[in-house]
Amino acid sequence: MPLANPVRRLWRDLSLFDGLAQSPEPMVMLVEGERIAGLWPEREFDPALAAGAEEAGRGGVMTPGLVDCHTHLVYAGDRAHEFEQRLEGVSYEQIAKAGGGILSSVRATRAASEDELIAASLPRLDALLADGVTTLEIKSGYGLTLVDELKMLRVARRLGELRPVRVTTTLLGAHALPPEYAGRADDYVSLVCDEMIPAAAEARLADAVDVFCEGIGFSPAQCERIFQAAKAHGLAIKAHAEQLSNLGGSALAAKYGALSADHIEYLDEAGVRAMAEAGSVAVLLPGAFHVLRETQLPPIELLRQYQVPMAVASDANPGTSPICMPSLMANLACTLFRLTPREALSGMTAHAARALGRPELGRIAVGAPADLCLWDIRQPAELAYAVQAGRLRQRIFNGVITHAR
Ligand code: DI6
Ligand code: FE
C-alpha cells in the first residue's frame, strides 16, 4: 500500500545520467517515498509541482545506483600467495590443477561458520556500498557440498538484510570439481542437479544458477544438464563462459535463455549471434582480465554490431579479481576493452540490471525505485576517467539517503 504521506525530496540542477544516456540540460528530480516521482529540465520546472518537498541536494552528477551483477563476495581466507606465484610465472590453470585456486578458497570456506563468513564479507560489501553499489549479485561456489553451498547462499541473503542494498543470489555449484569427486565429474553434476538446485529453489535461496564452462571447469554437456535442472525449478540461468578457451558455452547458455554469459574473452561470432538472438547480456569482467594479465580481448566490436547489451562487473573474488571498487571497473573497461565511458556506465547500471533479470533497476525514470548516486564530479564520464575514492556525495537506497557527506 502506498504511504499516506510519503517523504518528498527534491534534487536541483543535476547533470543526470539515466542509465543509458546523459540528459542534454540540467535536471530536477523528485523522489516520493521509495520511487522517483518526477523529472524535469531545470528551465521548465515549476516549484508548484513539488510543493512541500524538502531540497535534498543541488548540483553534481546523478546516476542510478550502481549494479554489480557478478560477484563472488562471500568466501573465507585469501590467495595472496597465489598472486605471488603467478607473478613468478605459474599460470592460473597450473595452480588450479595442483589443488590451489578455487579449491583453496573452498577449503577455507567449508571450514568457516556462517557468522565467520559474514564477518569476512562485510568489509568487502561496505567497500562496494561506499563506491555507489545499490544492487549486487552474490554467487556461491566455494562450498561444493549441499550443506556448504546453501550456507553460502544464506550468508549472501543475510548480507542483504544487514545493509541497505539489494542482493540477488546465484547458485554456482558447478564452479570446480571438489576433490572427493575426482574422476567422477558426472556424479558431481548429478549432485548439483538432483540435490543442490532443488534444495536452493525450495528454500528460495537462489535466484539463478551459474556454471563454469571451461576445461578446468565443466564440459558443455555437463553444463547443459545443469541448465535443464535450473529451468525445471524455475531458476534463471547464467554462465562463466569463454574465459580461458572457446567451448561454445555462451551459445549453449543462450539456447536456454540465459540472462547473461560472463567473461567471454574467447567468444566467437557464432556465440555473439546466439546471444543477440536470445537477448542475453554480455557481462565483461575487466578486473579478472587485468589480474590474470590476459591478452585475448572480448569481441567488443562484434557485440556492438549485434547490439548485445554489455554489462561491466567486478567479479570480486579471492583469485582473479580481489577488487571491490566499481569505479575502477569502469576505468578498466575503458582502458583495457576500449568501451566508451558512456558504455561503461550503462554497463554498471541499466545493462547490469538486465543481466540480473531486474530491468526496473539501474535506470533513472519516473516510477522506478529511487536507488541513486549523487557524485561530486562535473560530468558522468569522470567516473570512468579518474580513479579516486570518496567522490560519492550521497547514496540513496529505496528513497532513503544512506550515505551523505
Ligand atoms: N572464473 C573466475 O574468474 C572466478 N571464477 C570463475 O569461474 C575465479 C574464482 C577464483 O579463482 O576463486
Ligand atoms: Fe566469476
Image (cartoon, grey):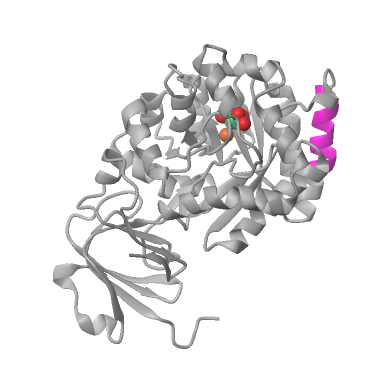
Residue under the image location 37 percent in, 43 percent down: 327
Residue 172 visible within the image? yes
Q: Position of residue 178 (x, y in %)?
A: 78, 28
Q: In this view, does 105 lie to the left or right of 374?
A: right
Q: Give the range drawn in magenta.
A: 185-196
Left-right relation of 19 to 210: left
Percent of width and height locating residue 10? 29, 74
Q: In which quarter of the image is ligand 1?
A: top right
What predominant SS class does the magenta segment belong to? Answer: helix
Q: Can you see residue 133?
A: no
Which residue: 43% across, 31% down?
A: 286
Q: Identify which residue, 344 or 80, lies in the foreground.
A: 80
Q: Which of 362 and 329 lies nearest the eye of the viewer?
A: 329
Which quadrant of the view contains residue 37?
Answer: bottom left
Q: Position of residue 309 (x, y in %)?
A: 42, 38
- Return the residue found at the far left: 43
